[in-house]
Amino acid sequence: MNILFLSHEYPPLGGGGANACRNLALQFAKHGHTVHIVTSGYGNLPERECLEGGKIIIDRVKAKRKNCDHSKASEMLDYLHKAYRLLDSATWMQHFDICLCFFGIPSGPLALHLKKKYGVPYIIRFGGGDIPGFQDRFAVLYKLLSPQIQRIWKSADALIANSVGLQKYALDYCSKFPVKVIPNGVDTERFSPIDESLKGDTFRLLTVCRLIKRKGLQDVIPFIKPLEQDTGKSIRWTIVGDGPYREDLEKLAVEWVCHEKIKFLGERAQSELPHLYHDADLFVFPSHREGMPNAVLEAMASGLPVIMRKDCQGSFELIHNNGISSDENFIRDLKDLIHRTSPELKSMGERSRQIVIDRFTWECVFRQYEDVIKQVTNHDT
């Protein structure tokens, strides 16, 4: 099959949705399909790339993109406009069996247009921020766009959320259309555990995320020193990632006199992440809202126990005796995990690894997308 992927973000741009786009493209190519990706240009990235023996073709349109890790509404609109000009051609569109649309906004209007004009069915894969109400910064814009968003959902041949929590978010916004759940995946070869025991009385926390307010790091920083006093352990917290909230978090660490215990590493290359997971005892993820957090999957694949909020999307699927899904007092539950013995934490980490092996490999995720595409296109893929 020839499959069109529409995504305004593709690595090195973006986060979890971009990562899913790349890994699913690799899986489709591995299984003999051809994937054509239309995404945003950035910096010196080539306008066209052919990968995997020509099975993956990437076209980057010259959209006005200023930041690698996030985009403004105006930049998304520019991507939509430029991608529309590129794709609005019968010569292009006659080759595609289906369109997989990453994010209902901004790519959804383009997918709707292509279906109406060329008859190409489309699937929307929600990422979180494309659902009205998920991101406060787009609240006014999404209120204005709500009728168009519902038209896009109604005309889609399938709607997919990457967690049960995100599915609920979508249905709370509009319950007229069914939403299927297919989770994110993780590369279990790149992210794998090593046999290393806890190092003395130093307890090593790790967080990998974009530094924005809804990730909840500001809720934990004031309690680092009290946690040391209560547990009798020296705590070191490594925070990997960057974003507009970093300066505020660093100031907060100074204010609570724990800046020497917290290391802000900034953005790190994918090649560096496995080592960082190996050098931790516990993965801390206090985010309030997600789709399904890739960093948690990576930590689990690396054999780490995890703490995340119970009301954070993805926790229902990810936390099963491999850490704590905190429903009320995150700091209390974090203290509980720091108090656990080395064998207990190791057992939780082994459980984390088994969960991703059983349910969250990219091969497993691909098969679920393949089944949906078969239903939509009546193809025996």
Image: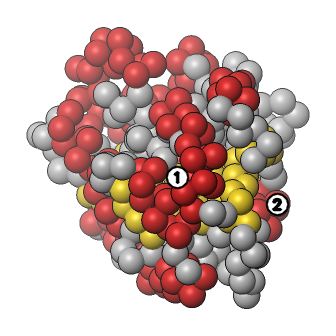
* Element carrying mark 1: strand
Q: Nearer the viewer, residue 88 or 187?
A: 187
- Residue type at the position of mark 2: Glu
How crowded pointer 2 is (Cα within 10 Å; few <14, some 14-19, many 20+) is rated as few
- Residue type at the position of mark 1: Phe
Q: Residue 310, relative to residue 26: is it above or below?
A: above
How crowded pointer 1 is (Cα within 10 Å; few <14, some 14-19, many 20+) is rated as many
Q: Earlier in the sequence, mark 1 or mark 2?
A: 2
Q: Nearer the viewer, residue 278 or 134?
A: 278
Task: Locate residue 213, reporting x and y percent.
Answer: 53, 30
- Display coloring: secondary structure
Tell which tag, 1 or 2, sits nearer the viewer: 1
Q: Residue 176, relative to residue 161: is it above or below?
A: above
Report the side of 283 relative to 115 (left or right). Answer: right
Q: Is residue 301 visible?
A: no
User: Mark 1 highlights which residue?
Assistant: 285
Task: Locate residue 299, reporting x and y percent.
Answer: 60, 66
* Element carrying mark 2: helix
